[in-house]
Image: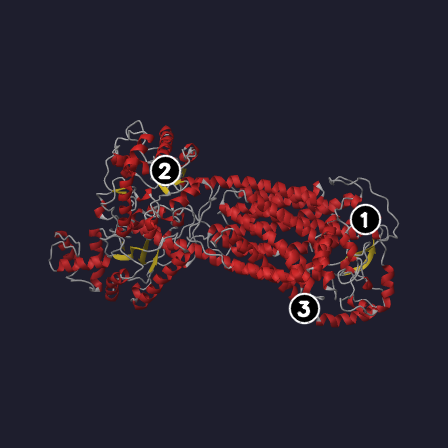
Amino acid sequence: MITTTKPKTAEGGSVVEERKGIFAGASRFVARYAWAHLVVSFVGAIALSYVGMVIGEFSPEIDNEGWLSRGTEIADRSTQYFILAGNYFRLAGTTDNEDTWIDLTGNPQPNYSDSVENAGGDVRRRKLSFALSNNSNQEEKRSIGGSRYLQTNEFDVLCEDDYNSMSASDLAPIWKTKNDISAFDPRVIQDICEAEQTTMNVLFRDNLCQTCGDDKCLAPVSIVLFARVTVGDTELELSCSELAEKWEEKRSETEERVLSCIEEVKVAYTATGFSMPDVCPPGFYTSMVDEDYAAEGNNFVKYTSSIFPTQWGKGAAQRLYDIVDEFDKADNSKVVEGAYDNARESLGLIKTDDAIGTDMLLACASGAITSVAILIHTRSLWLTIIGLFQIILSFPLGYFVYTFIFGLNFFPFLNFIGVFVVFALGADDIFVAVDKWKNARLDYPKATTEQIAAIALPDAANAMLLTTTTTAAAFFGTAICPVAPLKCFAIFVGLLIVFDYLLCILLVFPALCIYDRSLMKGSNCCCTIGCGSEKEEDNDDNRQLPESNVKNNSAIEAAKKGGAEAVVDHRHNLPEIIGDSFIRRVLLGYYFYFHKVRWIVFALSLGGTIVSGLFAAGLQLPENSDVRLLNENLEYEKNYSWRLKLLSTVLEKSGGSEGGMVWGVVPADTGSYVDPASGTKLVLDPAFDPSTMESQEYLLDFCDRFFEQEFASLISENFACPFNTFNEWLVTVSSNNNTTTEDNLLSIDSADFVLYDEHCNGATGLPMPQKDFNSCITAWAVEKSEQSLLLRNGAIEAIFFFFQGRVRFDSPFQIQSDEWELIEGWLDNEKERAPEGVKKMFQTSIDFWWFDTNGSMLRSAYASAGIAMAVSGVIIFVSSRSFILTLFALLTIAYVLVSTTAMLVASGWTLGFLESICFAILIGISCDFVIHFCHAYAHIPGNVDRHYRTKYALVRMGPSILAAAFTTVCAATIMLFTVISFFQQFALILFYTIIQATVGSFVVFVAFTDCIGPSNPTYLVDSLFSSKKDNEGNAMNEKKEEQPPTAIYPLKQPQEENYYDTTQSSNNHSIEEVAHAKNLNPNHQQNVNASLPTIDMSEKHKIQSMDYWDGEVEC
């Protein structure tokens, strides 16, 4: 309850409450020195903003790194693994490497998560070159960039030898046919041929292609080149139309060979080795057809590709990006269309960076819409300008704390979404503050500015604090995510929400005082729109509320007729809820008809929630774990999605990826988890000791057991684990068998015998005596340049080797999870049997690191969603002090979530990690509206009819909620036109959430309260926690018998201060019962009634002439 002192009389004789307390006193102080507070706050905000942006060296550059988890078990394994993998050539095969070991263990190393430059790109493309080994029998086959998937049999064509230097960096458009026409159709061949020639001319002009001679580019590897080889045009002399004619003659028999080729390719392909079958026609690559070709009798090729041999070097990607619009995409073709990029998605990466800047321009449009909304709502240019400063300054102030207090230097591109968020949500606080003030002034038109400030500002600050807490908690809760861009995004936007609240108090509150004082003096210096500048003369203080005030609305007329539908109980002095503004009349009319069908709406709300929940349950995990940052309609995303259809891509994906087994290092990350530029030191395992006989024997047998498992295969056919190779060498040399066999693949010469005699002390195999082990194996490793044994000071410091896994980074998440659990389960059993010195081994891969990144973000999303939901529940309960209303609110929030999710399912969404993060954040946003309704419903003290409470909450809170919903929906609509897919996803889910939150508040929650809402919602909580206060209150009441009550009576009877007990079922209450509800002594009831002033609408007209808009306020 609000504490007051005795009523004070303002100018003109009206009675005004005098609130006491710290916040009321502070509000009066702000009003008294409003200009000083505004200037000091503004200067302080500008100064801190300058420090943050200038000294903090804010840069608008886009940072798109760090899209890998940090600090998790898998992430810690991977960081250590990649330090070894990146430095093995300096550590293996030599003992002169102490400086390297000191550097790796003493200094932070470059963060190998940077090897993945783009979360949406092909993670495998950044792998170290040592991870791929080719089968020796491929030497006679022609391949592109060393890839075992893009091969062809020998073919004779102009400058054929130059094709061996091609790579994944080369420009590689993908072509998609139209109208169910196969890519082998001569019309498609001709159109692709003409498009390729145009593009080659552009590349040659800018010196961006590899040339065949001095006058033209190398012909791209494509279905066109294949057609030329097939028809015998080895000198590339035929025109495109001539080629199409000749191809028509060869098409049928060639397609038969291609079909036979593909069937054998699918059978012959293995993860560890692949050679193009001899049946395949020369010049044919698996990148020329899609995965569905030859499947179940399908002879139709929908997707094919061209690979232009391109010049590469510094700035080449940017140069290609600058002229990409000049490349021929066959736009005028009726049979085919193209999309350009390369296998590394270099052009798409550049587009992503450029799109950030473009999308930020849309934030300005969002700000313009917010400005107009604020201006319309406040009707004051002064308040609009101050409100914009409040929103804008929250960004640099948030950056100040982000940089100097939290010590965060990494500023990912996601942080820029905060611009949209703060414009969308920042206006809400302004609406609350302005409406609170205006309603207080409407209630007390004769009060001084200080008296109004003591009433309005604490109420506004409290109302804003509720929604600020829930929204900020949703963002800060997301900061538990171990992925740096999302963690930093959550922290930064949470700070924006907090500073928007603080700046509203520091800037908007004193601005309101200045605004009010100016209007009370009759001045228009605050740029009020549509108000007069002259102060009207005071009318007679004996004012009466005329009936004509509400006769313009049919619903209000119906309400005045009484009965159950009226929800107005004149018998107990409850003030009638009056439609004294257009929006109030609309809401009263809405309630009038809603009340008639409330039970039907209640049933539909429950049914709709259940149906939405069932439909929302259809939300699936994505088919792959890849993350795309660009809109799917862009050329670069088309290139990516079409590339996935190619047979070469499918073969590559089916081959899995390379992983590594590691001994000798500890999973750890000593760098900063929120800075991708901060790497870790190499952390060695002090317990690692492979020299004991037990460890030797275990390591010798480990590989055989490991590669017997279904999840692991040899990285190449000639690979052998280092201990197995060393053991074979010992056996061979000790038996003086100087031969080479297919089994051991060892070549023994005299140097081996010298080494053996000097270091191995006659050992005949493993295990060997511990005292001889280090000397013997290190000498052998140096002699044979063994790459899997990392040596230091004459001993093995670490061991690692590669294996071929079955899953990739873009495999479905559940498949990745199952594979991880399978491998880890097997290794856990191995650790139980392993000797102490070698039992801390682990496996990892870049693909499992990406799996961990996705999994961590999903888990963080669920956890942060729980945090947001818990905080929302607590805030709702604290603000309403009602278990029942809290339950209603949580059910309403559940409706919002399931209905929003159902809409997203209907839109084709899957539950990727970005979508999960959006869900977690928007739980906090979705509860804002219902919090206001809860607080308003419970605001009336005592036992009051549920229908009256519902209408009161609807009319008091409806205008502000609708205004907030409008500005947020406008900002979300602007974001839908952005390029970055995450921005679009956030905008879409924000749009759906606000729409459903509005429906949930005005329909679902209102149906709950109007049908089964409590008439005294705070009774149980007050009973549980107020017994001591009741005892003290009885003593105080005895003293109050001797003095008039200290009630508050404004000029217009404020509903929250004049409610007496009433219920729908009881029509008769004694004066004692009514007085008890307000803690009034019945002996003084007549004095109370006598003190109630009558109101004339001339006072209302005067207020309107002072441009106080008659919209209502959030609770």
> Which of pointers 3 and 2 indicates the residue nearer the eye?
2
Q: CA distance from mark 1 to mark 2?
A: 72 Å
Identify the amino acid type marked 3: Val
SS under mark 3: helix
Label whose residue precedes the other's in the sequence (3 or 2): 2
Quadrant housing residue 518: top right
Tell me if label 1 and label 3 are in contact, CB under 8 Å: no
Q: CA distance from mark 3 to mark 2?
A: 69 Å
Q: Choose between 1053 and 915: the one closer to the eye.
A: 915
The answer to whether residue 575 is above or below residue 334 is below
SS under mark 1: helix
Would residue 679 appear left or right of 473 to someone viewing this image?
Answer: left
Is any part of residue 505 visible from this angle?
A: no
Q: Which residue is denoted by mark 1 in the rendering?
A: 1100
Q: Choose between 133 and 303: the one closer to the eye.
A: 303
Pointer 3 local density, CA inside 10 Å: few below 14, some 14–19, many at least 20: some
Q: Which residue is denoted by mark 2 in the rendering?
A: 171
Label whose residue precedes the other's in the sequence (1 or 2): 2
Label whose residue precedes the other's in the sequence (1 or 3): 3
Residue at image x 38%, y 44%? 643
